Amino acid sequence: MIYSVTLNPSIDYVIELPQLELGAVNRLTHAVNLPGGKGINVSRILQTLGLPTTAWGFLGGFTGTFIQQQLDAIAMPCDFTKIKGDTRINVKLKAESETELNASGPTITSDEIADFKSKLAKLAAGDVVVMSGSLPQGLPTTFYRDLIPVIHEHQADFVIDTTGQALLDTLPDHPLVVKPNHHELAALFNDAPYTSQDAIIKSGRRLLDLGAQHVLISMAGAGALMIEHDHAWLGTVPKQPAVNSVGAGDSMLAGFTGTFAQTHDALESFKVGIACGSATAFSEDLATADKIAAVKQTISITEV
Ligand SMILES: Nc1ncnc2c1ncn2[C@@H]1O[C@H](COP(=O)(O)OP(=O)(O)OP(=O)(O)O)[C@@H](O)[C@H]1O
Ligand SMILES: O=P(O)(O)OC[C@@]1(O)O[C@H](CO)[C@@H](O)[C@@H]1O
């Protein structure tokens, strides 16, 4: 079972207009509400792939009710902690370029934290916990890291989708996979923007040396690298206009983690990860199973 943890879910209010004019009344050409938050996106993709998943996290208020209803409508297994505060609404504005307005989220009380932590007793050997996204108010910045010993006590693995020092801090605990994009990788090691694949691979190997079990470096439309100590692979998809970048990274993480948990085949998991990421980039919402299967056919993986 793969448990996703979304401490700060969101309704993603996706709006479109040809051009945004600041300081004026703008009329939208399209608007849709989607259940969002990085962990929820991971669980949605896992469910699309037919892999067992349960979504954990905090939900509250009318916004939380909407998300729960949307997830119930797709029969997503969920075990959220109900909170007094209102789950946030994030605005995803698509005009000449994509702009995201992410709210800080509700305040979580100590009773709510205790209820959430009690869920971890359900973990069993071989499970994976994927923790992603920002922390709502009231949670210490160490919240994710503090869960790792409990996850390990149950012989389960963990993935934390984070960046910077928070990512470096998790490496000694051997996350199943880390997936920074190439900009995040450069920032991690104070590298200048990469001008060669070799430089990315060299820095990626530092993540392995520091403890990561698997390293993927995503590069948006240019695909991704999977880096091992003695091998590295580049995965690419033919160029197509991207319609949405929201959730591409979450989709990739879900595809890799879910497939690896089932097969222990890293190269196949890498391929499915890219297929899920790119299929989401080519879709208005997260990718469908048909889209993932079609994109997977077009992926080329080469050893570099
Ligand atoms: N424009 C695109 N065209 C094709 N595939 C894409 C595009 N953007 C993203 N992807 C796919 O999604 C994967 C992850 O994308 P990206 O490198 O942007 O990660 P990220 O920065 O974590 O994403 P996010 O925008 O979700 O935070 C890529 O490796 C690729 O497979
Ligand atoms: O504010 P956070 O928690 O960092 O990111 C939240 C978020 O932008 O991430 C998802 C896409 O990855 C969206 O569904 C959601 O709105």
Image (tube, rainbow, N blue to C red):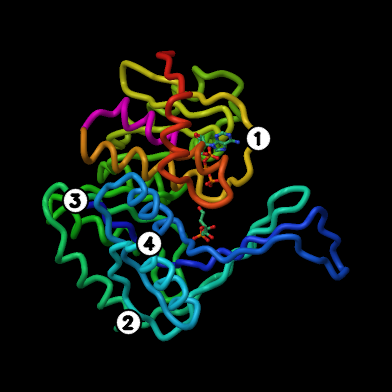
> Label 1 CB, ligand 1: below 8 Å?
yes
Q: Which residue is mark 4?
A: 74
Q: Can residue 209 be seen at all in this image of the molecule?
A: no
The Cα atoms of the two marked residues, 1 and 4, are separated by 28 Å
Q: Earlier in the sequence, mark 2 or mark 4?
A: 4
Q: What is the quadrant of the C terminus in the image? A: top left
Kind of residue sitting beneath label 2: Ser
List x then y, in percent, for residue 42. Answer: 39, 52
User: Looking at the image, is 80 positioned above or below residue 197?
Assistant: below
Q: Which residue is mark 3?
A: 127
Most distant residue in the bottom direction: 84
Q: Secondary structure at mark 2?
A: helix
Task: Give residue 241's mark.
Answer: 1
Task: Give residue 9's mark.
Answer: none
Whether label 1 touches label 4, CB < 8 Å: no
Residue lying at 82% horizontally and 54% vertically, measured from the top left: 19
- Binning the other alpha carbons within 10 Å of mark 3 as few (below 14), some (14 to 19) or many (20 upward) gives some
Front residue of 27 and 254: 27
Q: What span is in magenta?
A: 264-275
**Would residue 178 be found to the left or right of residue 182 on screen?**
left
Q: Earlier in the sequence, mark 1 or mark 4?
A: 4
